[in-house]
Amino acid sequence: MFRKLVRNKKAIDTIMATLLMVVIVVAASAMVFVYATGLFGALMRPPNFQKEALSLEFSNFGPVNPTYNVTLYLRNTGTVPITLTSYYVKDASGNQYAKNPWTGLSITPTALGQPQILISACGCNNTGTPFTYQTGYSYTITMLSSRGSQFQFSAVRYS
């Protein structure tokens, strides 16, 4: 009987097809299980309502030295205090100046903070090329918080 089964090619094809179907179903089931477990795990986490947000209300170059100093008036519109830890300034030519780490300031929710963004060649935790704020040019200022949030603002020196 076994010899008949071995000689019968149709029986071997049927067995191989059945085994192949079982392997495909097991693999598909495993993929669905992994996907569903990850999805349900993400859905079961409690939402995080703490949000860091800053808005630029005004910028002022100077008054002491407007070529190296800009003061930003930032309002904390988020729900948690924000501690600023570093900043990067980029000019229109692509020159970048960074202060990292920076002893910035903490701004509580709804409060107004006034960080001074200085560009100088003092060599104290600075990287990049110091440049001067030129009249009529726009500067992109990127600030980082202690929680890793990034805030980007644009300031133009008019006079």
Image (cartoon, helix red, strand yellow):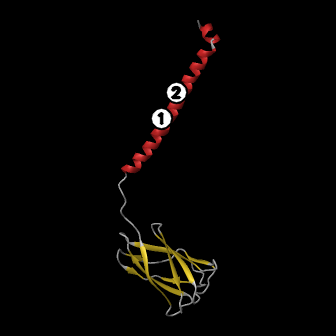
Q: Position of residue 24 (x, y in %)?
A: 53, 31
Which residue appears at 61% of the width and 8% of the height? Answer: 4
The residue indicated by pointer 2 is: 22
Q: Position of residue 101 (x, y in %)?
A: 52, 74
**Separation of marks 2 and 1 at Cα, in angstroms:** 11 Å
Amino acid identity at mark 2: Val
* Residue nearest the observer in this picture, 53 or 87: 53
Where does the C terminus fall, quadrant-wise?
bottom right
Amino acid identity at mark 1: Ser
Which quadrant holds residue 36? top left
* Residue nearest the observer in this picture, 91 or 80: 91
Tag shown at residue 29: 1
Q: Residue furthest front?
A: 10
For label 2, the crowd category at 10 Å Cα-Cα, with few meaning under 14, some 14 to 19 and many 20 or more, is few
Where does the N terminus fall, quadrant-wise?
top right
Q: Secondary structure at mark 2?
A: helix
Q: Is residue 94 above or below residue 7?
A: below
Q: Position of residue 130 (x, y in %)?
A: 62, 83
* Residue nearest the observer in this picture, 134 or 85: 134
